[in-house]
Amino acid sequence: MTQERKHTEVAVGILLRGDGALLLSTRPAGKPYAGYWEFPGGKLEAGESVEQALRRELIEELGITIGPVQAWKVTEHDYPHALVRLHWCKVRQWQGEFEMREGQAMSWQHFPLQVSPVLPGAYPVLEWLEQERGGG
Ligand SMILES: Nc1nc2c([nH]c(=O)n2[C@H]2C[C@H](O)[C@@H](COP(=O)(O)OP(=O)(O)OP(=O)(O)O)O2)c(=O)[nH]1
Protein backbone atom coordinates (compact mmCIF):
# COMPACT_ATOMS: atom_id res chain seq x y z
CA MET A 1 0.00 0.00 0.00
CA THR A 2 1.33 3.40 -0.86
CA GLN A 3 1.23 5.95 1.88
CA GLU A 4 0.95 9.69 1.37
CA ARG A 5 3.71 11.58 3.09
CA LYS A 6 2.25 13.95 5.60
CA HIS A 7 3.11 17.61 5.23
CA THR A 8 4.95 19.44 7.97
CA GLU A 9 3.41 22.91 8.22
CA VAL A 10 5.96 25.70 8.63
CA ALA A 11 5.45 29.42 9.28
CA VAL A 12 8.13 31.59 7.68
CA GLY A 13 8.69 35.31 8.18
CA ILE A 14 9.97 37.71 5.54
CA LEU A 15 11.09 40.63 7.67
CA LEU A 16 11.32 43.71 5.48
CA ARG A 17 13.20 46.77 6.61
CA GLY A 18 12.32 50.28 5.46
CA ASP A 19 15.24 50.32 2.99
CA GLY A 20 14.00 47.09 1.38
CA ALA A 21 16.53 44.78 3.05
CA LEU A 22 15.28 41.36 4.17
CA LEU A 23 16.47 39.30 7.10
CA LEU A 24 18.17 35.94 6.71
CA SER A 25 19.74 33.81 9.43
CA THR A 26 21.70 30.58 9.57
CA ARG A 27 20.22 27.30 10.72
CA PRO A 28 21.52 26.26 14.10
CA ALA A 29 23.83 23.28 14.59
CA GLY A 30 22.01 20.01 15.11
CA LYS A 31 19.17 20.70 12.63
CA PRO A 32 19.00 19.32 9.08
CA TYR A 33 20.87 21.73 6.76
CA ALA A 34 22.73 23.32 9.69
CA GLY A 35 24.58 26.44 8.59
CA TYR A 36 22.35 27.09 5.56
CA TRP A 37 20.76 30.55 5.32
CA GLU A 38 16.99 30.74 5.74
CA PHE A 39 14.16 33.05 6.64
CA PRO A 40 13.30 32.90 10.33
CA GLY A 41 10.40 30.67 11.34
CA GLY A 42 9.56 27.11 12.27
CA LYS A 43 7.01 24.35 12.53
CA LEU A 44 3.47 24.87 13.69
CA GLU A 45 2.67 23.22 16.99
CA ALA A 46 -0.64 21.42 17.53
CA GLY A 47 -3.57 23.84 17.46
CA GLU A 48 -1.50 26.85 16.35
CA SER A 49 -2.30 29.13 13.43
CA VAL A 50 0.46 30.23 11.05
CA GLU A 51 0.48 33.67 12.66
CA GLN A 52 0.64 32.29 16.20
CA ALA A 53 3.52 29.98 15.27
CA LEU A 54 5.41 32.81 13.58
CA ARG A 55 5.02 35.11 16.60
CA ARG A 56 6.23 32.37 18.92
CA GLU A 57 9.17 31.33 16.73
CA LEU A 58 10.47 34.88 16.28
CA ILE A 59 10.45 35.48 20.02
CA GLU A 60 12.19 32.13 20.58
CA GLU A 61 14.79 32.55 17.82
CA LEU A 62 15.34 36.29 17.56
CA GLY A 63 13.88 37.86 20.70
CA ILE A 64 11.58 40.19 18.74
CA THR A 65 7.83 40.77 18.97
CA ILE A 66 6.32 41.19 15.54
CA GLY A 67 3.52 43.55 14.48
CA PRO A 68 1.02 42.86 11.67
CA VAL A 69 1.56 39.63 9.72
CA GLN A 70 0.64 39.61 6.02
CA ALA A 71 0.05 36.09 4.67
CA TRP A 72 1.69 36.09 1.23
CA LYS A 73 2.43 32.74 -0.48
CA VAL A 74 2.31 29.02 0.25
CA THR A 75 4.94 26.71 -1.26
CA GLU A 76 5.96 23.08 -0.78
CA HIS A 77 9.33 21.41 -0.78
CA ASP A 78 10.14 17.73 -0.57
CA TYR A 79 13.31 17.19 1.48
CA PRO A 80 14.71 13.78 2.39
CA HIS A 81 13.94 14.60 6.03
CA ALA A 82 10.43 16.01 5.51
CA LEU A 83 7.78 17.17 3.06
CA VAL A 84 7.22 20.75 4.14
CA ARG A 85 4.47 23.24 3.40
CA LEU A 86 5.86 26.72 3.86
CA HIS A 87 3.48 29.55 4.77
CA TRP A 88 5.30 32.75 3.82
CA CYS A 89 4.34 35.92 5.65
CA LYS A 90 5.57 39.47 5.22
CA VAL A 91 6.34 41.41 8.38
CA ARG A 92 7.26 45.10 8.31
CA GLN A 93 7.07 46.05 11.98
CA TRP A 94 8.58 44.54 15.09
CA GLN A 95 9.74 45.55 18.53
CA GLY A 96 12.77 44.59 20.55
CA GLU A 97 16.46 44.10 19.95
CA PHE A 98 17.63 41.19 17.81
CA GLU A 99 19.27 38.47 19.91
CA MET A 100 20.43 35.30 18.24
CA ARG A 101 19.02 32.97 20.87
CA GLU A 102 20.03 29.78 19.05
CA GLY A 103 23.56 30.86 18.18
CA GLN A 104 22.66 31.72 14.57
CA ALA A 105 24.22 34.40 12.41
CA MET A 106 21.89 37.01 10.90
CA SER A 107 22.22 39.33 7.96
CA TRP A 108 20.10 42.04 6.30
CA GLN A 109 20.31 41.36 2.60
CA HIS A 110 19.53 43.10 -0.67
CA PHE A 111 19.49 41.46 -4.09
CA PRO A 112 21.74 39.99 -5.30
CA LEU A 113 22.21 38.05 -2.06
CA GLN A 114 25.67 38.08 -0.57
CA VAL A 115 25.20 34.92 1.54
CA SER A 116 25.07 31.22 0.60
CA PRO A 117 24.05 28.48 0.63
CA VAL A 118 20.33 29.20 1.11
CA LEU A 119 17.79 26.44 1.91
CA PRO A 120 16.39 25.13 -1.38
CA GLY A 121 12.83 25.52 -0.05
CA ALA A 122 13.36 29.29 -0.09
CA TYR A 123 14.47 29.58 -3.76
CA PRO A 124 11.03 30.28 -5.30
CA VAL A 125 10.23 32.97 -2.78
CA LEU A 126 13.58 34.64 -3.30
CA GLU A 127 12.85 34.79 -7.02
CA TRP A 128 9.43 36.34 -6.45
CA LEU A 129 10.86 38.88 -4.04
CA GLU A 130 13.56 39.82 -6.50
CA GLN A 131 10.97 40.23 -9.28
CA GLU A 132 8.88 42.48 -7.03
CA ARG A 133 11.87 44.73 -6.69
CA GLY A 134 12.22 44.98 -10.41
CA GLY A 135 15.44 42.99 -10.22
CA GLY A 136 14.64 40.59 -13.04
N1 LIG B 1 12.51 28.60 8.93
C1 LIG B 1 12.60 28.22 7.65
N2 LIG B 1 12.39 26.92 7.30
C2 LIG B 1 12.50 26.63 6.00
C3 LIG B 1 12.84 27.60 5.03
N3 LIG B 1 12.92 27.00 3.82
C4 LIG B 1 12.64 25.68 4.02
O1 LIG B 1 12.61 24.82 3.17
N4 LIG B 1 12.39 25.45 5.37
C5 LIG B 1 12.12 24.13 5.92
C6 LIG B 1 13.32 23.53 6.62
C7 LIG B 1 12.70 22.66 7.69
O2 LIG B 1 12.42 21.36 7.13
C8 LIG B 1 11.38 23.35 7.99
C9 LIG B 1 11.47 24.20 9.22
O3 LIG B 1 11.62 23.40 10.31
P1 LIG B 1 12.66 23.68 11.49
O4 LIG B 1 13.29 22.40 11.85
O5 LIG B 1 13.54 24.82 11.14
O6 LIG B 1 11.62 24.18 12.55
P2 LIG B 1 11.64 24.30 14.12
O7 LIG B 1 12.48 25.50 14.48
O8 LIG B 1 10.21 24.29 14.55
O9 LIG B 1 12.40 22.97 14.53
P3 LIG B 1 12.47 22.08 15.81
O10 LIG B 1 13.90 22.13 16.20
O11 LIG B 1 11.51 22.67 16.80
O12 LIG B 1 12.08 20.72 15.30
O13 LIG B 1 11.09 24.19 6.89
C10 LIG B 1 13.08 28.94 5.42
O14 LIG B 1 13.41 29.83 4.62
N5 LIG B 1 12.94 29.20 6.76
Image (tube, grey):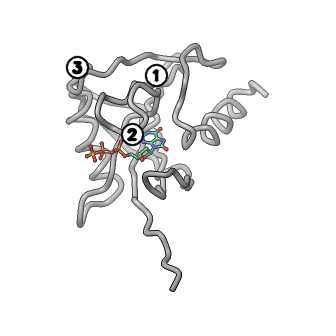
Left or right of 93? Residue 45 is: left
The quarter of the picture where residue 34 lies is: top left
Furthest residue in direction top, as rendered? 114
Q: Which mark is residue 130?
A: none
Residue contact at pointers 3 and 2, CB within 8 angstroms: no
Circle nearer the viewer, 3 or 2 = 2
The image position of residue 15, as x and y in percent, is: 43, 31
Q: Which mark is residue 99?
A: 3
Indicate if the residue with disc 2 has its beta carbon within 8 Å of ligand 1: yes
**Three-letter amino acid code of the residue under disc 1:** Arg
Indicate if the residue with disc 3 has its beta carbon within 8 Å of ligand 1: no
Dot 1 corresponds to which residue? 17
The quarter of the picture where residue 6 lies is: bottom left
Which residue is pictured at 23% across the width and 64% down the height?
46
Which residue is pictured at 46% across the width and 32% down the height?
38
Left or right of 9? Residue 121 is: right
Label located before the other in sequence (3 or 1): 1
Given residues 8 and 5, the one toward you in this image is 5
**Three-letter amino acid code of the residue under disc 2:** Pro
Dot 2 corresponds to which residue? 32
In the structure shown, which secondary structural element does the residue marked by tag 2 occupy?
loop
Label located before the other in sequence (1 or 2): 1
